[in-house]
């Protein structure tokens, strides 16, 4: 999942970005409203975490311009403004969620997860595909009850495919949602990542969970389906 | 009685009752005097009538031409009247039948009463009597048979005394009835006056009650309410006006306090959020040593910044708490302004050089100012650091002082080129936490420096005038006392109540 963080405090921007990346998200960060608006318009983010009091362009203005431009990316407002009126204005301007500073990092993660699930019309954090069980809250994967250790990026790839189970997902889509804007993408980076993931989640001589659709992309579906 | 209504009621009812008692007593005494006087006149007429029946015979004896039937009131009966005639030798010459041989005055005793007097009648009732001194005329005299002789005159013929008495119980009953009527009326009037006074006082004090009721409804959340002064009675208008003024000041104070609290909360939220995020992310993924080290440095920076904000706030709060003329005046000293300006400018030399700013200083060498050196240095540091920080790269800073006429102090102007300030910013820039950038992304300045400058200026009696000239030249003018003014006993600047900031716009 790919997240855009628009925050003018450098220390907050750095720590939240690091935390989200370690939590399995691809994160792009912007220090002002102008840069944030540009990124939000040009990149396909799953969630945008947006401060309100931003230099150059105010966060609410960024939100309004996004919505006016037809972008329906989920937006979480992260701000020091805590009055009911502030929250009402923020939510009515098109935000999907509102979190007041200071905040618990776990709460921010949970809210981003909830927004991600909402994007894929899922309520339950657990996704079961045959013997494989993906816990989108704990960011863990088990096969027949046994924990499979995955890197954050491998987990992100599996979760992205799982949220679109049964659908063919193109390499471009995977690149756009799993890698941030600064990732050095080589031509076979997605194939390599899928290959590494298959080695961890499939059993030897068993049917692969992630199947290749030549020329189209990949599809995650139950073995034998 | 503590209520105004109660006090007024007690006083008015008391005064009404006292006036009623006085008026009733006077009326009673007046009526009694008149009635008794009429009674006495009637007695005197009767005495005169009795006396006119006396004749002096040539042989010196007195003849009394009286027929009982012609004056039946002197006959025995129910409540008879009485008369007794006493000769010059104090012997009783004649008496009414109703006396039955008794005397109104004892025989051979002087009749002391020149005025009507009260006495006990032979029948035991209380009566009233009058003594009439008469000189009977000779039998042949055609004139009135008897002539009244005033007591102080000496008559040619010896006078006789005619004493007439009659029962006065009817008179006393009438006077008692009058007293009862007056007392009753007084009581009724007193009772009625309680109600009337209470009604009148309540009605008269209604504007005061309404004012009090409206005052009780005003609280911290309703300080925007005001009294309709025009609708108040003349006596209450000054109170209403003063209350409105007080409410205005309270509302401003509360608003300022709330804004300051909100600003403090907001100002501390971001660094706290930074601290939480840094520590929680570092705790959650503790194996990344490089990241943890960076986060520790970040946390330290945040702590230093919060410390700076809190210390400046404390300085501001303490300064406001100790705001007294004596405190500021006691620590004043004379020192050269040019020296202080030079010291402060050298402290910002690095920033001036880094931003390629041109600095011009024009402060007369001999100019000594008369202020608290530590506080004034803090003012200068804030103003010059701001000038160096906010002037655009390659801009100018000027610091010039001009001595005014004798006793007028001096004017110090600190100015810099500015490409961000607008005229509307000038009234706001002394508010705590105000910053031009609403996002407050600037980590180096918390927006408390100018608030401290204004507070110190207030204590030192320095007048601050911010000006924006031509849209890109910002000036801060300081009018401050000089050492020469202090020596000459120049005008004292009020410290506690004056607003240190004046605004003027230059277009």
Image (tube, coloured by chain):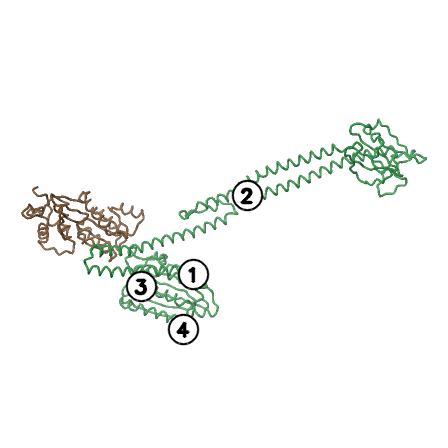
> Nearer the N terminus, badge 4 or badge 2?
2
Callout 3 touching callout 2 (CB < 8 Å): no
CA distance separating discs 4 and 2: 71 Å
Bin the neighbour count of mark 4 within 10 Å (Cα to Cα): few under 14, some 14-19, many 20 and up: few
Colour chain B is painted in: green
Residue that carries the numbered disc 3 in the rendered image: B417
Residue at the image position 85 percent from the left and 39 percent from the top: B109
Residue that carries the numbered disc 1 in the rendered image: B323
Colour chain A is painted in: brown
**Rendered image: mark on residue B2:** none
For disc 4, the chain is B
Quarter of the image for residue A220 reads: top left
CA distance separating discs 3 and 1: 33 Å
For disc 1, the chain is B
Callout 4 touching callout 3 (CB < 8 Å): no
Residue at the image position 34 percent from the left and 70 percent from the top: B343
The outermost residue toward the bottom is B366
Determine if residue A71 is in view: no
Residue that carries the numbered disc 4 in the rendered image: B366
CA distance separating discs 4 and 3: 28 Å
Q: Do labels 4 and 2 share a chain?
A: yes
> Nearer the N terminus, badge 2 or badge 1?
2
Residue that carries the numbered disc 2 in the rendered image: B6
Image coords of residue A18 (percent x, y) = 20, 55
In the picture, measured across the screen, residue B323 lies left or right of residue A151, that is: right
Callout 2 touching callout 1 (CB < 8 Å): no
> Nearer the N terminus, badge 4 or badge 3?
4
């Amino acid at each position: 999942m790919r997240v855009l963080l628009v925050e003018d405090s450098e220390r907050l921007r750095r720590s939240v970005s690091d935390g989200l990346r370690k939590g399995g998200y691809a994160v792009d960060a912007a220090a002002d409203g102008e840069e944030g608006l540009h990124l939000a318009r040009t990149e396909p983010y799953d969630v945008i975490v947006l401060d309100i009091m931003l230099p150059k362009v105010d966060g609410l203005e960024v939100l309004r311009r996004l919505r006016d431009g037809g972008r329906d990316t989920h937006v979480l407002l992260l701000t020091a403004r805590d009055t009911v009126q502030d929250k009402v204005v923020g939510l009515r301007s098109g935000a999907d969620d509102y979190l007041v500073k200071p905040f618990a990092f776990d709460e921010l993660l949970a809210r981003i997860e909830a927004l991600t699930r909402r994007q894929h019309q899922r309520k339950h954090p657990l996704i079961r595909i045959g013997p494989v069980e993906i816990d989108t809250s704990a960011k863990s994967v088990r096969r027949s009850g046994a924990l499979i250790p995955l890197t954050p990026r491998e987990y992100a790839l599996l979760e992205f495919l799982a949220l679109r189970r049964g659908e063919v997902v193109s390499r471009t889509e995977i690149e756009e949602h799993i890698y941030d804007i600064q990732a050095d993408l080589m031509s076979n980076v997605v194939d390599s990542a899928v290959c590494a993931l298959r080695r961890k989640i499939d059993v030897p001589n068993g049917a692969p969970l992630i199947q290749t659709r030549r020329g189209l992309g990949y599809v995650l579906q139950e073995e034998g389906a | 009685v503590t209520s105004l209504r109660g006090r007024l009621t007690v006083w008015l009812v008391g005064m009404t009752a006292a006036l009623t008692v006085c008026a009733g007593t006077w009326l009673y005494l007046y009526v009694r005097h008149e009635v008794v006087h009429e009674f006495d006149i009637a007695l005197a007429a009767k005495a005169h009538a009795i006396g006119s029946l006396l004749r002096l015979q040539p042989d010196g004896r007195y003849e009394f031409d009286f027929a009982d039937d012609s004056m039946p009131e002197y006959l025995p009966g129910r409540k008879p009247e009485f008369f007794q005639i006493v000769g010059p030798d104090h012997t009783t010459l004649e008496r009414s039948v109703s006396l039955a041989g008794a005397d109104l005055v004892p025989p051979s005793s002087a009749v002391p009463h020149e005025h009507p007097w009260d006495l006990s009648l032979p029948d035991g009732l209380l009566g009233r009597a009058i003594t009439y001194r008469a000189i009977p005329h000779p039998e042949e005299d055609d004139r009135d048979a008897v002539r009244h002789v005033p007591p102080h005159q000496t008559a040619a013929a010896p006078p006789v005394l005619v004493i007439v008495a009659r029962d006065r119980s009817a008179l006393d009953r009438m006077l008692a009835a009058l007293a009862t009527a007056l007392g009753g009326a007084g009581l009724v009037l007193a009772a009625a006056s309680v109600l009337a006074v209470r009604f009148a006082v309540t009605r008269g004090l209604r504007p005061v009650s309404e004012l009090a009721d409206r005052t009780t409804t005003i609280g911290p959340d309703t300080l925007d309410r005001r009294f309709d002064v025009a609708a108040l009675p003349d006596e209450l208008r000054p109170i209403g006006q003063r209350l409105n003024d007080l409410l205005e000041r309270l509302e401003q104070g509360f608003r300022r306090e709330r804004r300051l609290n909100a600003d403090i909360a907001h100002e501390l939220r971001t660094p706290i959020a930074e601290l939480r995020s840094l520590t929680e992310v570092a705790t959650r993924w503790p194996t990344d040593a490089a990241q943890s080290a960076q986060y520790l440095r970040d946390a330290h920076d945040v702590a230093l910044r919060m410390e700076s904000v809190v210390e400046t706030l404390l300085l501001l709060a303490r300064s406001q708490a100790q705001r007294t003329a004596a405190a500021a005046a006691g620590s004043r000293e004379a020192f050269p302004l040019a020296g202080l300006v030079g010291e402060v400018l050298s402290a910002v030399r690095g920033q001036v050089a880094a931003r390629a700013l041109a600095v011009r200083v024009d402060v007369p060498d001999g100019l000594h100012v008369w202020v608290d050196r530590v506080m004034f240095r803090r003012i200068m540091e804030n103003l010059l650091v701001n000038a160096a920080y906010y002037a655009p790269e390659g801009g100018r800073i000027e610091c010039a002082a001009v001595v005014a006429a004798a006793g007028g102090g001096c004017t110090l102007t600190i100015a810099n080129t500015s490409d961000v300030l607008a005229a509307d910013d000038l009234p706001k820039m002394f508010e705590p936490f105000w910053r031009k950038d609403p996002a407050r992304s600037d980590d180096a300045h918390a927006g408390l420096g100018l608030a401290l400058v204004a507070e110190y200026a207030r204590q030192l009696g320095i007048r601050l005038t911010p000006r924006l000239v031509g849209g890109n030249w910002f000036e801060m003018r300081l009018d401050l006392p000089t050492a020469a003014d202090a020596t000459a006993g120049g005008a004292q600047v009020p410290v506690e109540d004056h607003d240190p900031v004046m605004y003027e716009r230059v277009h």
